[in-house]
């Protein structure tokens, strides 16, 4: 096995599935480890007002905010602001959502490990009422 380079622009952008996202969300450069590697992720861009559904990760998730301003909320907690340069660790099994603020786009690199072939468990969508800060 040798090192693999995925050149910029080699993979087309795709729209995030509306089943799990609200608003305009683009996924770029998805990656997945091979062999015994369990890590995978993608670069995700949320346009203003866009967000993902409530979800959990069996082994946690790291977010690296590369552009803009976003929001993150843990179930039962207050909405927190995340900004370019922030790194967020979400522990395993914590129900949460993340996305852009109403007036600003946000891009992050999302990294998570798979357990038994799954890195995420999607739950219900975040309502407009829940999205208000």
Image (cartoon, helix red, strand yellow):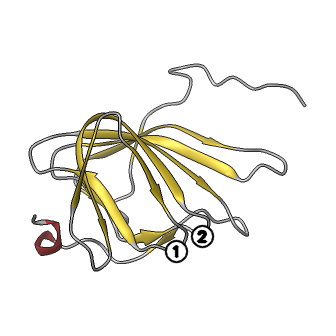
Q: Is residue 67 above or below residue 78?
A: above
Q: Quadrant of residue 72?
A: bottom left
Q: Residue at x 53, y 20 (%)?
A: 8
Q: Which mark is residue 58?
A: 2
x and y percentages locating residue 27 in the rendered image:
42, 42
Instruction: Determine contact: label 1, label 2, CB under 8 Å.
Output: yes
Q: Quadrant of the C terminus?
A: bottom left
Q: Is residue 5 above or below residue 85?
A: above
Q: Nearer the viewer, residue 14 or 88?
A: 88
x and y percentages locating residue 80 in the rendered image:
23, 58
x and y percentages locating residue 83 in the rendered image:
26, 40
Q: Nearer the viewer, residue 81 or 7?
A: 81
Is residue 21 in view from this perspective? no
Q: CA distance from mark 1 to mark 2?
A: 6 Å
Is residue 72 in view from this perspective? yes
Q: Secondary structure at mark 1?
A: loop
Q: Tell me which label, 1 or 2, sits earlier in the chain.
A: 2
Q: Is residue 20 above or below residue 86?
A: below
Q: Quadrant of the N terminus?
A: top right
Q: Which residue is mark 1?
A: 93
12 to the left or right of 114: left
Q: Residue at x 20, y 39 (%)?
A: 105
x and y percentages locating residue 5 in the rendered image:
69, 22
């Amino acid at each position: 096995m040798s090192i693999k380079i995925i050149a910029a622009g080699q993979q087309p952008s795709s729209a995030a599935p509306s089943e799990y996202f609200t608003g305009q969300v683009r996924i770029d450069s998805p990656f997945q480890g091979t062999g015994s590697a369990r890590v995978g992720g993608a670069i995700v861009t949320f346009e203003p007002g866009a967000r993902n559904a409530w979800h959990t990760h069996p082994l946690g998730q790291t977010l690296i905010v590369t552009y803009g301003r976003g929001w993150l909320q843990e179930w039962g907690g207050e909405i927190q602001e995340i900004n370019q340069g922030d790194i967020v660790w979400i522990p395993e099994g914590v129900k949460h959502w993340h996305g852009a603020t109403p007036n600003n786009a946000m891009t992050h690199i999302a990294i998570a490990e798979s357990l038994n072939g799954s890195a995420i468990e999607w739950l219900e969508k975040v309502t407009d009422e829940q999205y208000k800060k």
